[in-house]
């Protein structure tokens, strides 16, 4: 296999499971990857071209809605660096008679740990499930903390606007 094999395979999934927007009146499908695939590169792209998905009703701030950047997130992770493609975990191989084929019942690897995870991770199903669930729980808690902080910021910005603070004073630093 060549070095970019997993990356090329994942472009199939990444055609839909990625960040994109529709540009202009003609609504041309556009990927914000000119500066790279890292989230900070995508944000820099949007900041440079001034794209926004809508204006926040309470704060007046321009808002971006990340579609579903699984491809970009995968691209920055350990699985991509190790040459593991989406289908390796989400469509693991199975035996049908004498044939070895990809399972086309696309689903969470945690529902099929023995075929999805254990070919590479040589731990028990219980250990692998526990590790994955711990990561998911930590991510969920961090996401909730970020969302709570964002709601607090929106509340503070609205209060400042209602108090008559000028937009220049409320602009990002």
Image (cartoon, helix red, strand yellow):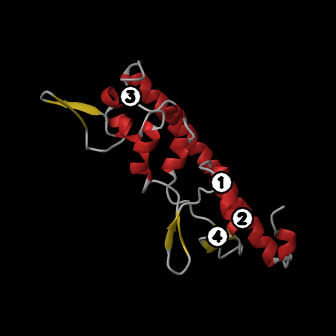
Describe residue 13's horizontal placement relative to residue 38 as left or right. Answer: left
Please give the label number shown on residue 51.
4
Going from N to C along the chain, the mark reached first, 2 or 3, is 2
Please give the label number shown on residue 35.
1
Q: CA distance from mark 3 to mark 4?
A: 39 Å
Check contact, mark 2 vs mark 1: CB within 8 A.
Answer: yes
Image height of 68 relative to 6, above or below: below
Instruction: Give the structural element (helix, strand or loop) at label 3.
Output: loop
Check contact, mark 1 vs mark 4: CB within 8 A.
Answer: no
Nearer to us of marks 3 and 1 is 1
Going from N to C along the chain, the mark reached first, 3 or 4, is 4
Going from N to C along the chain, the mark reached first, 3 or 1, is 1
Name the residue at the left extreme.
97
Q: Quadrant of the C terminus?
A: bottom right
Image height of 152 relative to 117, above or below: below
- The residue closer to the viewer here, 153 or 92, is 92
């Amino acid at each position: 296999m060549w070095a970019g094999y997993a990356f090329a395979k994942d472009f199939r999934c990444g055609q839909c499971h990625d960040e994109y927007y529709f540009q202009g009146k003609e609504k041309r499908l556009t990927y914000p990857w000119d500066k790279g695939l890292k989230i900070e590169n995508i944000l820099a792209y949007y900041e440079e071209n001034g794209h926004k998905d809508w204006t926040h009703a309470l704060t007046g701030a321009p808002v971006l809605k990340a579609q579903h950047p699984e491809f970009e997130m995968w691209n920055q992770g350990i699985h991509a660096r190790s040459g593991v493609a989406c289908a390796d975990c989400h469509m693991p191989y199975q035996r049908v008679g004498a044939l070895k084929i990809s399972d086309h019942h696309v689903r969470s690897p945690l529902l099929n740990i023995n075929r999805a995870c254990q070919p590479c991770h040589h731990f028990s199903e219980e250990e692998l499930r526990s590790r994955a669930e711990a990561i998911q729980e930590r991510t969920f808690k961090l996401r909730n903390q970020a969302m709570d902080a964002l709601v607090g910021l929106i509340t503070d910005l609205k209060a400042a606007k209602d108090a008559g603070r000028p937009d220049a004073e409320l602009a990002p630093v």
